[in-house]
Image (cartoon, rainbow, N blue to C red):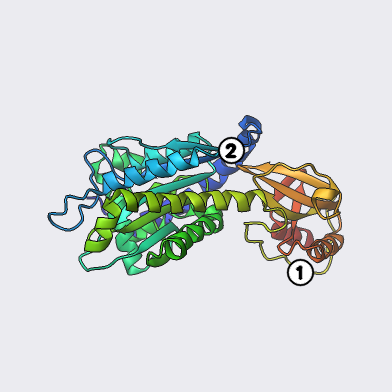
């Protein structure tokens, strides 16, 4: 088992950030050309484990296999989602065979998916029970690190894991910290979906919810879309294991996940006015002298829905411009070389109900960091 030095981790983490930023910005440009205007919402469903990797086996003598239960629930979720003509379902596996973690992410990325949902079952030496939904994060509690270690160790079943995972060691906390950056921009959307799933488990099915957790999980590491990993419950708990192993239990859990995905999609489709993105802090400063190739706009919303840039779609505001960014469209109000005027436009947008509106900067027609523009112009 490889041991990773802190120097290697820091170097790897820094290179990951640089490479990701470059590849992501290049990827957005190519996606904008390659993507069609299809209204289909693509969901990749990932049944954990499979083949020679059975996952956890529940209580001794129970006969449970995580891989079988995860697959049954995954297929049931997909069957229900497929009834919606606007949803396309893709499975990473639809049978009992082994897939490398890196392959699962590649399937989602090649499909240009809108969501990635990985389904698993939990285990513990105690009588613990309840559901958990994970999003990728680098701040791990001791228990979340244990979950991440358990789910990540499947890479040791892969022949070329050292090559595929850049020296990543599931047993190294420092190594786990290094895998969070790629999913960082999708965390808020992932949390939105995770919350809907856990609410459906808890309020709809009366299952105990252990909440939304963040952990460094490799299966979500390279997925360039909102991603969650659902732990349906503990197979090691006598009552919960029996429920999850039953057709009735699997059907109920699948329906709860399906309903959450549809509700998430509906929220996203109607998300004109409230962006899923966390707005960066605007730099409040005295108006600097702005270069002629710099302009400011006010971002109103980000949505999967392609709208006509007409004032009637944006509470009377205009002019409106639209930009494709990955699977979303970003909508902007105004266009001015004056930062002071841009701040007034932002205040106007917020008065109209766009409470998360914020100022963005363009340089030579390209979206750039607002803070960097203001700093460079003030120097």
Relative to residue 294, is residue 100 drawn left or right?
A: left
Q: Nearer the viewer, residue 190 or 40?
A: 40
Q: Residue 357: x, y in percent?
A: 74, 60
Name which quarter of the figure residue 300 lies in.
bottom right
Q: Is residue 251 above or below residue 30?
A: below
Name which residue lies at 38% across and 67% down: 210
N-terminal of the two: label 1 or label 2? Answer: 2
What is the crowding at mark 1: few (fewer than 14 residues within 10 Å), some, or many (at least 20)? few
The residue most toward the front is 248
Relative to residue 91, is residue 265 drawn left or right?
A: right
- Can you tell which mark lies on residue 284? 1
- Can you tell which mark lies on residue 86? 2
Name which quarter of the figure residue 337 lies in.
bottom right
Q: Which quadrant of the figure contains the C terminus?
A: bottom right
Relative to residue 89, is residue 327 drawn left or right?
A: right
Q: Is residue 265 above or below residue 240?
A: above
Q: Is residue 310 visible?
A: yes
- For the image, the number of numbered tags is 2
* Front: mark 1 or 2: 2
Q: Residue 163: x, y in percent?
A: 33, 39
In what element is the residue under mark 2? loop
What is the crowding at mark 2: few (fewer than 14 residues within 10 Å), some, or many (at least 20)? few
- Can you tell which mark lies on residue 231? none
């Amino acid at each position: 088992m490889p041991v990773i030095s802190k120097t290697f981790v820091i170097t790897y983490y820094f290179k990951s950030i640089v490479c990701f930023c470059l590849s992501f910005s290049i990827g957005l440009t190519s996606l904008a050309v390659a993507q069609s205007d299809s209204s289909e919402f693509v969901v990749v469903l990932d049944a954990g484990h499979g083949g020679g990797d059975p996952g956890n086996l529940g209580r001794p003598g129970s006969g449970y296999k995580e891989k079988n239960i995860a697959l049954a629930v995954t297929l049931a979720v997909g069957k229900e989602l497929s009834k919606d003509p606007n949803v396309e379902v893709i499975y990473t596996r639809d049978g009992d065979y082994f897939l490398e973690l890196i392959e699962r992410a590649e399937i989602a990325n090649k499909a240009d998916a809108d969501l990635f949902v990985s389904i698993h079952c939990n285990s513990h030496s105690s009588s613990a029970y309840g559901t958990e939904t994970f999003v990728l994060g680098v701040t791990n509690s001791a228990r979340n690190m244990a979950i991440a270690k358990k789910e990540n160790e499947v890479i040791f079943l892969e022949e070329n894991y050292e090559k595929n995972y850049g020296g990543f060691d599931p047993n190294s906390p420092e190594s786990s910290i290094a895998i969070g950056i790629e999913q960082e921009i999708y965390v808020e959307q992932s949390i939105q979906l995770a919350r809907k799933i856990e609410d459906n488990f808890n309020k709809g099915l009366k299952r105990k919810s252990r909440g939304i957790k963040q952990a460094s999980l490799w299966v979500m590491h390279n997925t360039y879309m909102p991603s969650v990993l659902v732990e349906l419950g503990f197979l090691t708990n006598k009552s919960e294991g029996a429920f999850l192993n039953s057709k009735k239990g699997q059907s109920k859990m699948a329906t709860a996940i399906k309903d959450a995905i549809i509700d998430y999609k509906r929220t996203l489709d109607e998300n004109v006015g409230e962006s899923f993105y966390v707005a960066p802090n605007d730099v409040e400063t005295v108006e600097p002298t702005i270069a002629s190739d710099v302009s400011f706009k006010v971002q109103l919303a980000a949505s999967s829905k392609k709208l006509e840039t007409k004032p009637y779609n944006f509470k009377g505001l205009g002019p409106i411009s639209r930009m494709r960014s990955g699977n979303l469209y970003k909508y902007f109000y105004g266009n001015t070389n004056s930062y002071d005027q841009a701040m007034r436009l932002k205040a106007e947008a917020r008065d109209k109900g766009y409470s998360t509106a914020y100022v963005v900067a363009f340089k030579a027609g390209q979206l750039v960091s607002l803070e960097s523009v203001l700093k460079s112009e003030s120097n």
